């Protein structure tokens, strides 16, 4: 079975048109019909019934089943092809969060000179997206964040690099700016800006806010770290976040928060990913360095 036949079929069902499907892939309509025929032969069943008088068709029961699963099958076959291709190449990939993981690359990479020519960095601001890339075998190793020191997933190996308490981030002229320690009670009347659910910060802040009876109407959410920083710097909102997100900003200061929740920075490996020998060597060396540094810190 060809992956492309499934791709054509999925688009055909969603567009309800042989013409539109052919145009979308720059092929002829007979090519789409032949592709459909190959699928029907493959599964030994009829997938659609065409009404040529109305230039329409309806899905048979088997067609409904195939369409329901086509997206998953396409993704799986595509990922499998990519994994096989990765084995044949000497590319080495490392995923990281620029604002978080970037702070640790200077400690981890100096001993990795032999891999630099083959190294491809994959950057994502969102820990959730990074974990999805790992889980989907699009990456085998990444520096990511979590709200717990232990990520309970059977497919991964986790190595703790660092843990940092969230801090209160405010503008220099904010009423709290000169405080040496900020309590939840001191924050009860202020508005907050938080990163949205794509970020690990969301889960950590949400848990803290609920535990401290912060009204949801006091909280705004954003998809962009830069936007959160702008709200904080303007004095409109307070941020509860790890200081690494604002460390290079002179218009924001970070203050200790009493009983602050922690943000955990981890080296995550998908132990089930199919990887080439160079990537395997790279992953192991990075693990060794991370474990050594973790022992020195803790």
Image (tube, rainbow, N blue to C red):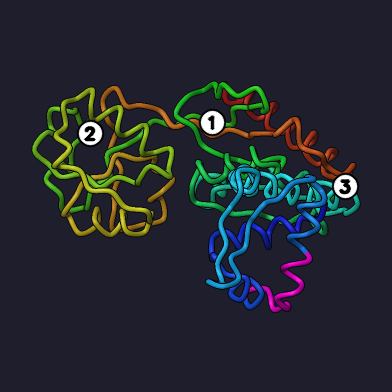
Region of the chain picked out in magenta, as a range: 24-34
- Write the residue at 29% across / 53% down: 252
Q: Main secondary structure of the magenta part?
A: helix
Mark 3 and mark 1 in contact (Cβ < 8 Å)? no
Q: Is residue 106 visible?
A: no
- With respect to residue 23, does 202 lie above or below? above
Q: Kindly identify which numbered label has been placed on residue 180.
A: 2
Q: Is residue 58 above or below residue 156?
A: below
Q: Secondary structure at mark 2?
A: loop
**Position of residue 41 measured from the top left corner of the image (x, y, whole percent):** 82, 51
Total marks in image: 3
The span from disc 2 to disc 1 (Cα, nearest Å) is: 24 Å
Q: Using the image, tell me which numbered label, if any, was put on residue 143.
A: none
- Near mark 3 (Cα within 10 A), the count class, few <14, some 14-19 or many ≥20, is some
Q: Kindly give the residue lying farthest to the front in the view shown.
A: 53
Q: Is residue 76 visible?
A: yes
Nearer the N terminus, badge 2 or badge 1? 1
Q: x%, y% of residue 191?
A: 15, 45
| Mark toward the start of the polypeptide (1 vs 3) | 3
Circle 2 Cα neighbour tier, 10 Å, few/some/many (<14 / 14–19 / ≥20) = few
Q: Nearer the viewer, mark 1 or mark 3?
A: 3
Residue of label 3: 87
Q: Mark 2, mark 3: which one is toward the viewer?
A: 3
At mark 3, the secondary structure is helix
* Residue to which mark 1 is pinned: 162
Question: Residue at coordinates 12% horizontally, 32% vertically from top-left?
Answer: 186
Image coordinates of residue 15 in percent, x first then y, are 54, 65
């Amino acid at each position: 079975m060809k992956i492309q036949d499934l791709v054509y079929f999925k688009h055909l069902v969603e567009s309800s048109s042989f013409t539109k499907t052919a145009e979308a892939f720059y092929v002829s309509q007979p090519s789409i019909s032949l592709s459909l025929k190959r699928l029907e032969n493959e599964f030994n069943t009829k997938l659609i019934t065409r009404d040529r008088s109305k230039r329409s068709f309806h899905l048979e029961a088997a067609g409904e089943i195939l369409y329901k699963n086509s997206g998953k099958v396409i993704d799986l076959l595509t990922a499998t092809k990519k994994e096989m291709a990765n084995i044949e190449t000497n590319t080495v990939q490392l995923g990281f969060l620029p604002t978080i993981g970037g702070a640790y690359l200077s400690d981890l990479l100096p001993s990795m000179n032999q891999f630099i020519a083959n190294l491809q960095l994959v950057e994502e601001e969102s820990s959730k997206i990074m974990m999805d890339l790992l889980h989907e075998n699009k990456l085998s190793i990444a520096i990511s964040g979590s709200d717990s020191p232990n990520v309970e997933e059977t497919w991964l190996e986790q190595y703790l690099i660092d843990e940092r308490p969230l801090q209160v981030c405010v503008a220099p002229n904010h009423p709290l700016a000169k405080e040496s320690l900020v309590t939840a009670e001191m924050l009860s009347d202020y508005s907050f800006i938080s990163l949205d659910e794509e970020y690990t910060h969301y889960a950590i802040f949400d848990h803290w806010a609920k535990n401290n009876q912060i009204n949801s109407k006091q909280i705004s959410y954003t998809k962009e770290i830069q936007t959160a920083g702008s709200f904080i710097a303007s004095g409109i909102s307070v941020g509860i976040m790890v200081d690494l997100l604002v460390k290079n900003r002179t218009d924001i200061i970070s203050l200790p928060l009493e009983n602050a929740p922690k943000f955990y920075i981890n080296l995550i490996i998908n132990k089930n990913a199919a990887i080439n020998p160079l990537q395997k060597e790279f992953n192991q060396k990075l693990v060794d360095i991370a474990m050594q540094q973790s022992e020195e810190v803790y």
